[in-house]
């Protein structure tokens, strides 16, 4: 999910810094999920709902603030990075005001971890991949045309505004549901797309290869987190950041 989301956004803004974990969308999902954890002691399902809601709100705000006679890639990246810092500050504030047990639960979750995940999380991310994964693959054609520039894409018969909105919704949904299942695991969305492009030697978004690269990096990082310093086990988010 992280790999596909990263590939979508990096291609959409034509900038490798356009990853959802860099431009604040993953942070918005994390803020929504932490709100559910701290204030509502929510179940996995409600945490997922909070993550999706937070991710969509963050994407909407970034898009609105980046708008200036259209949305240019560099404005979206800069506004998104600023939004990411603001969201991080909001999360820190919530944690300083929360009960200690909620703080512990939120802090572990914010690191990004596969430890203690059960079938509720599997069902959540499984449903996301079954519904949103094929949509992302089907949108690859429009995404490749948008990568040529808005004017060229329009000349090729693409409804630019509608296509971008659809891609943003799918990308945010994938990132947010990934966050709800495992926390905001660092840098998976950021690195999966560029690695996939190099492996298949293609300038396109490479959504399917990015999905497999994201999964591979996550599994390798989790294995390293559990084995390198055994018997000490690290959260996978720490290891992905180190990698």
Image: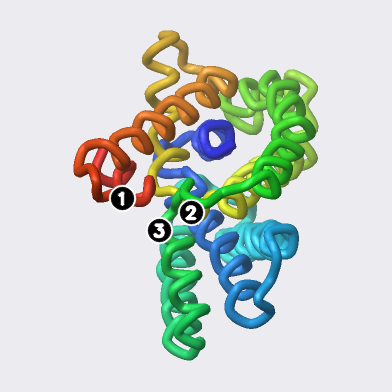
Label located before the other in sequence (2 or 3)? 3
List the single residue furthest toward the top: 201
**Viewport quadrant of the C terminus:** top left
Q: To which residue does mark 1 refer?
A: 234
* Residue 67 is at least partly visible in this image: no
Q: How far apart are marks 2 and 3 (CA)?
A: 7 Å
Q: Nearer the viewer, mark 1 or mark 2?
A: 1
Label located before the other in sequence (3 or 1)? 3
Q: Residue 205 versus residue 173: which sits nearer the camera?
A: 173
* Residue 205, image quadrant: top right
Q: In this view, does 90 lie to the left or right of 153?
A: left
Residue 41 pos. (x, y %): 65, 76
Residue at image point 62% right, 47% down: 118
Determine contact: label 2, label 3, CB under 8 Å: no
Q: Distance between the residues labelled 1 and 2?
A: 15 Å
Residue at image point 51% right, 54% down: 183
Q: To which residue does mark 3 refer?
A: 111
Q: Which of marks 3 and 1 is in front?
A: 1
Q: How crowded is mark 3: few (under 14 residues within 10 Å), some or many (20 or more)?
A: some
Q: To which residue does mark 2 refer?
A: 184
Q: Residue 111 versus residue 199: which sits nearer the camera?
A: 111
């Amino acid at each position: 999910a992280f790999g596909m989301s990263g590939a979508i956004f990096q291609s959409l803004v034509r900038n490798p810094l356009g990853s959802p974990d860099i431009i604040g969308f993953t942070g918005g999902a994390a803020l929504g999920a932490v709100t559910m954890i701290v204030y509502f002691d929510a179940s996995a399902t409600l945490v997922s709902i909070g993550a999706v809601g937070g991710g969509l709100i963050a994407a909407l705000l970034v898009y609105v603030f980046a708008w200036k006679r259209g949305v240019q890639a560099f404005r979206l990246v800069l506004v998104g990075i600023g939004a990411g810092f603001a969201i991080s500050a909001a999360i820190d504030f919530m944690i300083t005001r929360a009960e200690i047990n909620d703080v512990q639960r939120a802090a572990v979750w914010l690191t990004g971890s596969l430890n203690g995940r059960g079938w509720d999380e599997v069902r959540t991310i499984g449903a996301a991949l079954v519904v949103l994964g094929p949509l992302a693959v089907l949108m690859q054609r429009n995404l490749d045309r948008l990568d040529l520039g808005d004017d060229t894409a329009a000349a090729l018969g693409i409804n630019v505004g509608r296509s971008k909105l659809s891609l943003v919704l799918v990308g945010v949904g994938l990132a947010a549901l990934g966050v709800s299942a495992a926390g905001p695991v660092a840098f998976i969305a950021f690195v999966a797309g560029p690695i996939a492009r190099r492996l298949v030697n293609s300038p396109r978004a490479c959504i399917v290869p990015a999905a497999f690269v994201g999964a591979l990096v996550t599994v390798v990082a989790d294995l390293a987190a559990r084995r390198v310093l055994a018997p000490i086990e690290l959260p996978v988010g720490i290891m992905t950041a180190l990698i």
